[in-house]
Image (cartoon, rainbow, N blue to C red):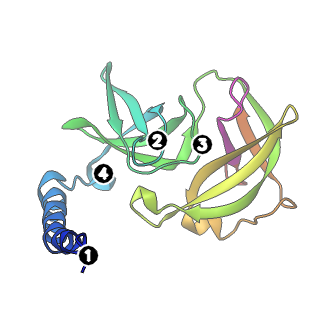
């Protein structure tokens, strides 16, 4: 038996139970289980920090009675841009607790936009937002002879009606000053 084996056994025997206990404590005691769907206050917030991964997360900033609040959100939107606006719900007792509707992206008031065509190349899952009700559509489009790619969360049921591939075109709206800020317009938008 190598000298490393006892250490690995120790990590497995002692580390796994403590990790499970710590996770249970966090989810049962620290997460108060606020019900955003039924108790959350609707608002509009903008992405004030973008990023996906273990060392970075997305943050939303919103105002309540003239005071700004910033809070992290769970999940990731592929290539989301600073300054994109989304429908959110927040906890009235703690406005930094925020839930975002990742399917509802808006441009800033008075922000100039361009329109082009693009196509959906693939669908990914939306489970990073804690629910399988979202699917991420990865789409590609051209503005001024430059190709861009982007992700957009869409409702799971809606994605069943959509086609992937370059031959199916969808209308894309993007910011005139930052073409990476973009969204697909569907027939019902």
Identify the mark nearer the N-term, 2 or 4: 4
Picture disc at residue 2: 1
Residue at position x 80%, y 63% in the image: 165
In the picture as drawn, the residue positioned furthest to the bottom comes out as 1
Estimate the spatial distance between the alpha carbons at disc 1 and disc 2, rounded to whole Å: 56 Å
On the image, the x and y values in percent for residue 110 come to: 63, 21
Identify the mark nearer the N-term, 3 or 1: 1
The residue identified by callout 3 is: 79
Neighbourhood count class around disc 4 (C-alpha, 10 Å): few under 14, some 14–19, many 20 upward: some
Residue at position x 49%, y 36% in the image: 50
Badge 4 element? helix
The residue identified by callout 4 is: 36
The residue identified by callout 2 is: 87
Identify the mark nearer the N-term, 4 or 1: 1
On the image, the x and y values in percent for residue 160 come to: 65, 71
- Give the prevailing secondary structure in the magenta stretch: loop
On the image, the x and y values in percent for residue 26 come to: 16, 56
The boundaries of the magenta stretch are 175-184
Tell which of 173 and 109 is nearer to you: 173
Estimate the spatial distance between the alpha carbons at disc 2 and disc 4, rounded to whole Å: 12 Å
Badge 3 element? loop
Camera-nearest label, 2 or 3: 3
């Amino acid at each position: 038996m190598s000298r490393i084996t006892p250490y690995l056994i120790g990590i497995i025997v002692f580390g796994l139970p403590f990790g499970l206990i710590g996770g249970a404590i966090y989810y049962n005691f620290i997460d108060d289980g606020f019900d955003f769907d039924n108790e959350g206050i609707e608002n509009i917030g903008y992405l004030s920090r973008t990023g996906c991964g273990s060392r970075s997360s997305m943050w939303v900033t919103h105002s309540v009675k003239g005071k700004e609040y910033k809070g992290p959100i769970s999940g990731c939107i592929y290539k989301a841009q600073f300054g994109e606006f989304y429908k959110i719900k927040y906890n009235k007792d703690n406005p930094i607790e925020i839930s975002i509707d990742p399917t509802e992206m808006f441009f800033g008031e008075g922000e100039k936009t361009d329109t082009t065509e693009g196509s959906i190349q693939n669908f990914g899952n939306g489970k990073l937002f804690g629910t399988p009700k979202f699917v991420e559509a990865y789409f590609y489009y051209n503005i001024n002879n430059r190709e861009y790619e982007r992700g957009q969360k869409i409702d799971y049921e809606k994605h069943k009606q959509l086609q992937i591939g370059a031959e199916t075109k969808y209308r894309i709206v993007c910011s005139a000053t930052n073409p990476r800020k973009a969204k697909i317009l569907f027939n019902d938008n």
